[in-house]
Image (spheres, rainbow, N blue to C red):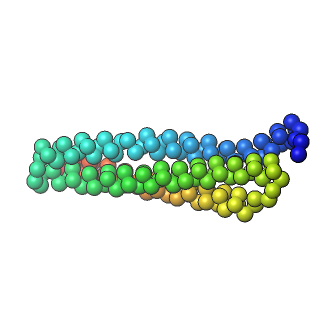
Amino acid sequence: MVMTNAQLTQIMQSSVAPCVLISGAGLLLLVLAGRLARPIDRVRHLCDLVKKHPGPEGESYRQQIDIFYKRCHLLRNSVATNVICLSAIATVILLLFLSNLFNVSLITPITVCFIVGVLALILSLLFFLNDLFMTLKSLEIEIRDSCN
């Protein structure tokens, strides 16, 4: 099979279209990775404060540590599902390219990978949203303790 430059260009264009989704998910991954560093640092700092303030006076620190630790889990889950999204969409691009290149129908695997990618992105965003709510819980504890 001899392919022209125009045919190859058309194949490449149809295979690269999902890159917009990859770009958006990649930016979200960048935000999530940066966001994950913050509660990790705060947990380390609060653990030092608990050591310095044992007993009841360190209770608010322990409450905050619990919240930050839960946030770390949420953010880890958000990052993991985001990576699943990116992997699924990259697979869509590969399958589209191969489908066009070899003139084979790969509609079912392409559809499944695309659906998995979008569902993983939705899950990632839900974990991220849950993290935002937990951030406010931690802030409430800090405000309560500083105003008393």
Q: Which residue lies most toward the top here?
A: 5
The image quarter containing residue 121 is bottom right
Q: Nearer the viewer, residue 87 or 98?
A: 98
Residue 129 appears in the picture as rendered: no
Residue at 29%, 43% (x, y): give it. Answer: 42
Q: Nearer the viewer, residue 137 or 92?
A: 92
Residue at 11%, 50% (x, y): give it. Answer: 54
Residue at 80%, 59% (x, y): give it. Answer: 105
Please state the horizontal and vertical placement of residue 55, each as a whole percent of the image. Answer: 10, 53
93 on left or right of 59: right
Residue 33 appears in the picture as rendered: yes
The image quarter containing residue 49 is top left
Instruction: Give the mark count.
Output: 0
49 on left or right of 28: left
Please state the horizontal and vertical placement of residue 133, each as a whole percent of the image. Answer: 40, 55
Please state the horizontal and vertical placement of residue 76, each as a whole percent of the image. Answer: 42, 52
Q: Which residue lies most toward the front here?
A: 1
Q: Quadrant of the N terminus?
A: top right
67 on left or right of 30: left
Please state the horizontal and vertical placement of residue 110, each as a whole percent of the image. Answer: 71, 58
Residue at 36%, 42% (x, y): give it. Answer: 38
Q: Nearer the viewer, residue 137 or 24?
A: 24
